[in-house]
Image (spheres, grey):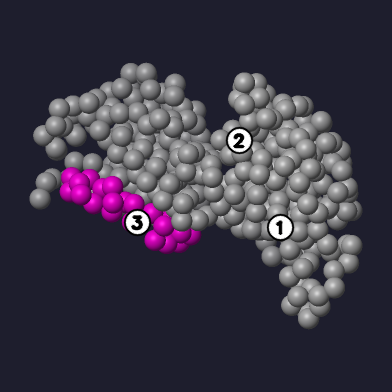
Amino acid sequence: MKEISFRVGVSDDFKSDAPGLLEPFLDQVFGPLPFVQCCFFPVKGHVVVSDDIRGYDAVITLKPRYTTASLIGNERLTIIARWGAGYDMVDVPACTAADILLAITPEAVRQPVAEGILAFFLALAKNLPARDRLTRSGGRDLTIENSGVSLSGKVFGSVGLGNIASQMFRLIHAFGPARMLACDPYASPTKAQRLGVELVDLETLFRESDFLAVACLLNDETRGMIDRRLLSLMKPTAFFVNVARGGIVKEADLVAILQERRIAGAGLDVFEQEPLPPDHPLAALPNVILTPHRIAWSDALYRGNGLGACHNVLTVLQGGVPEHTVNREVIHQPGFQTKLRSLAQRWAAATGEEPV
């Protein structure tokens, strides 16, 4: 048996929160490589402790936070591979300063999350919760209040025009929308035109959309960006969906808008505090559909994220750079290049192949 040359750490919240979700892909990618050892490491208090990841070349992670303190003394660590597309739980400047590459799996989440948005739109439009309650109580006669609306001829909007929102708009085409709107200061006008999407400001987006989704990153620009002022611009018949991050929306403002019936309803997969407390005001509202940050979880998502995260690690162990690197500025730093060359040489020694 070949000597262990590489050590890959896996956050143990996979075991508690997603048992069996990653293991098949660890076996598929690293199982045939006896010189790569995968080990679970503990996560205490949701923040990674430096000592617990010491000695790893790579880390695959689900939910825990990584701070500057998490990375102190981990000179060997070269990549943090996030299972998923979001990375607000990782201090990116701290990674860069420590010569650590951060990689994500955006291609894997595009279709599943877009489908999740569409599922919310359809469930809200057809008022499925009310119809479900009616049926369970033995009723069958719908009133105007608990009947639904058509998606055809409506205005669809998105905060953000990245991979997920773009795929959402491709799916929406089948329903014959009247217009499709997006607010994204970084979106290419050419891309928007190709999708048939109008780029507008936030106020116009909230004022004119019948179905509005939040599909952008959580960062310093977007944190708390959606507040009562913007929500108050929405039509009373409009629906609001958030599948991005809870921190983008001022939750108390959204609760008030929904309680006052200022909008028709909402579909929420993300919250300021997760899991959502059972006594949270949102849980008592009949015009809201709630899911536990799992609307997109499906066989396709598991496979795409699992293989994507493992292959991101494998690429770095071989001395390469993953396509979906978040902090690309780290690539040319001398410290990171030294790590990468060392990994390539160790890979060559373990496999007998020429260095990358």
**Is 2 positioned to the left or the right of 263 in the image?**
left
Q: Which x, y percent locates residue 50?
A: 39, 42
Image vertical order of residue 19 relative to residue 216, above or below = below
Name the front one of labels 2 and 3: 2
Distance between the alpha carbons at the discs numbered 2 and 3 = 31 Å
Image vertical order of residue 225 relative to residue 240, above or below = above
Q: Which x, y percent locates residue 289?
A: 71, 58
Q: Which mark is residue 275?
A: none
Q: Amino acid at mark 1?
A: Ala
Mark 1 or mark 2: whose residue is earlier in sequence: 1
Residue pointed to by mark 2: 166
Quarter occupied by residue 313: top left
In-front residue for pair 89/26: 26
In-front residue for pair 60/167: 167
Q: Residue drawn at (54%, 45%), measured in percent from left and top?
A: 111
Q: Is residue 27 magenta?
A: yes
Q: Which x, y percent locates residue 350?
A: 14, 38
**Is 159 positioned to the left or the right of 332 in the image?**
right
Residue pointed to by mark 1: 123
* Magenta range: 14-36
Residue pointed to by mark 3: 23
